[in-house]
């Protein structure tokens, strides 16, 4: 049920050191060897499939790497992963969420019925639930094939599912059938499709 408080703080300090070192080294390498860094990042993008997305160009996102905002975002993500309580095959946390109508429900009910890239949708950090609902309506403009809900302002779903910056899950009958790796680098929608096709065959 999570790490004991002293253990959690020690791990957080270690992660703070790792992220600080990562950002400092990245900034130095980007300054001294910009061509080589670009070459390596493009190779990783190609390998992971990120390069196939026309909205992710090098010019839009590499200048944001190793910035102060990047540091705080990566630190927040890594700290959140320390508290990840989900396991494939395990019980899915039944967190509170909010439908776009404003109706509060839990994630199991839904099952049944910082830092940003340049040239991205500009969504500020949400201060109120209305901000979050307004941002989610941008997704509705793309006509998703599923219901859309948002986390409450306590971010309980995001924390329990370790969902920052993005992560795909398949939940059924209160169990986790599939737990994807954190995106965008390890984000594999084709794995979700395979799980869903297997469920419906």
Image (spheres, rainbow, N blue to C red):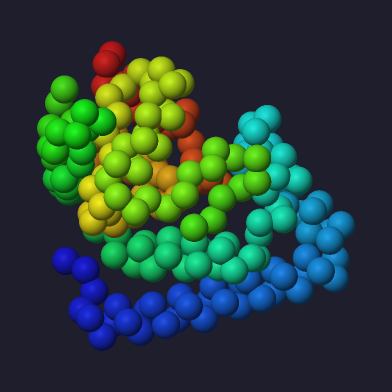
Residue 15 in percent (x, y) is at 46, 75
x and y percent of residue 2 in the render? 21, 68
How many numbered discs sit on the rendered protein? 0
Residue 28, image quadrant: bottom right
Please state if 92 lies on the left or on the right of 50 as rendered.
left
Q: Does 46 appear above or below 17?
A: above
Q: Quadrant of residue 169?
A: top left
Q: Position of residue 6 (x, y in %)?
A: 26, 85
- The foreground one among 24 and 42 is 24
Q: Can residue 125 be spotted in the picture?
A: yes
* Above or below, 41 relative to 70: above
Q: Where 111 sits versus 27, above or below?
A: above
Residue 137 horizontal/vertical position (percent): 37, 29
Q: Is residue 89 visible?
A: no
Along the viewing direction, whichever of 128 and 81 lies nearer the viewer: 128
Residue at image x 16%, y 45%?
A: 96
- Pick whichever, 74 or 51, lies toward us: 74
- The residue shown at (23%, 56%) is 154
Position of 16 with respect to 104 (left or right) is: right
């Amino acid at each position: 049920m999570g790490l004991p408080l002293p253990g959690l703080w020690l791990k957080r300090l270690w992660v703070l050191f790792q992220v600080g070192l990562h950002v400092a080294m990245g900034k130095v390498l980007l300054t001294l060897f910009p061509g080589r860094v670009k070459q390596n990042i493009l190779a990783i993008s190609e390998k992971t499939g990120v390069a196939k997305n026309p909205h992710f160009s090098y010019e839009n996102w590499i200048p944001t790497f190793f910035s102060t905002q990047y540091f705080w975002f990566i630190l927040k993500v890594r700290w959140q992963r320390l508290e990840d309580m989900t396991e494939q095959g395990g019980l899915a946390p039944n967190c509170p969420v909010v439908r776009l109508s404003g109706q509060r429900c839990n994630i199991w009910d839904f099952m049944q019925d910082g830092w940003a890239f340049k040239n991205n949708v500009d969504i500020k950090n949400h201060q109120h639930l209305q901000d979050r609902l307004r941002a989610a309506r941008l997704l509705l403009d793309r006509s998703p094939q599923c219901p859309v809900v948002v986390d409450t302002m306590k971010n309980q779903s995001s924390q329990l599912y370790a969902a920052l910056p993005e992560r795909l899950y398949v939940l059924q009958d209160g169990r986790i059938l599939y737990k994807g790796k954190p995106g965008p680098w390890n984000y594999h929608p084709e794995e979700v499709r395979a799980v869903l096709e297997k469920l419906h065959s």
